[in-house]
Amino acid sequence: MKNIISRMSRAAVLGFSGVVFTATQASANLPDAGEETGPGMSAFETITWFVLAPIAVWAIVWFLWSIPQWRRNARPVTGDQWDPKPSNSVVNR
């Protein structure tokens, strides 16, 4: 019997919280007294601010993060078979 009451009370709490959360989200869009709402965003502005701007920020951070690695990879590492021409062969030409 206690198990059934426990389950029913959990279901009631979850049902009530679902109603409260839904109602608060629905009423969040109501303007306050004396509030003047501005014009909405166009589809272009929405895509620009919520898609393109975050991609641009991510790309800048990635680029700045990658610069040191690119610079390290451009130099020969000690132990590599890197044998430039001797300077005397260049001068004697």
Image: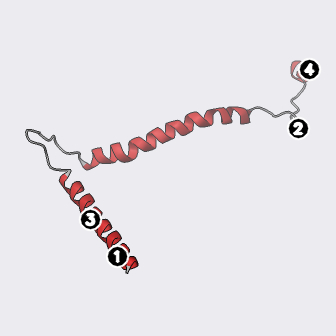
- Residue at 88%, 36% in the rendered image: 79
Report the Cα–Cα distance between label 4 and label 3. 88 Å
Quickly name the residue at label 4: 88
Q: Observer-nearest residue: 1 or 15?
A: 1
Q: Above or below — where is 89 with respect to 44?
A: above
> Mark 2 is on which residue type?
Gln
Dot 2 surroundings within 10 Å: few (below 14), some, or many (20 or more)? few
Which label's residue is closer to the chain start, 1 or 4?
Answer: 1
Left-right relation of 85 to 75 = right
Left-right relation of 67 to 30 = right
User: What kind of element bears circle 4?
Assistant: helix
Quickly name the residue at label 1: 5
User: What kind of element bears circle 3?
Assistant: helix
Q: Quadrant of the N terminus?
A: bottom left
Quickly name the residue at label 3: 16
Q: Above or below — where is 66 with respect to 85?
A: below
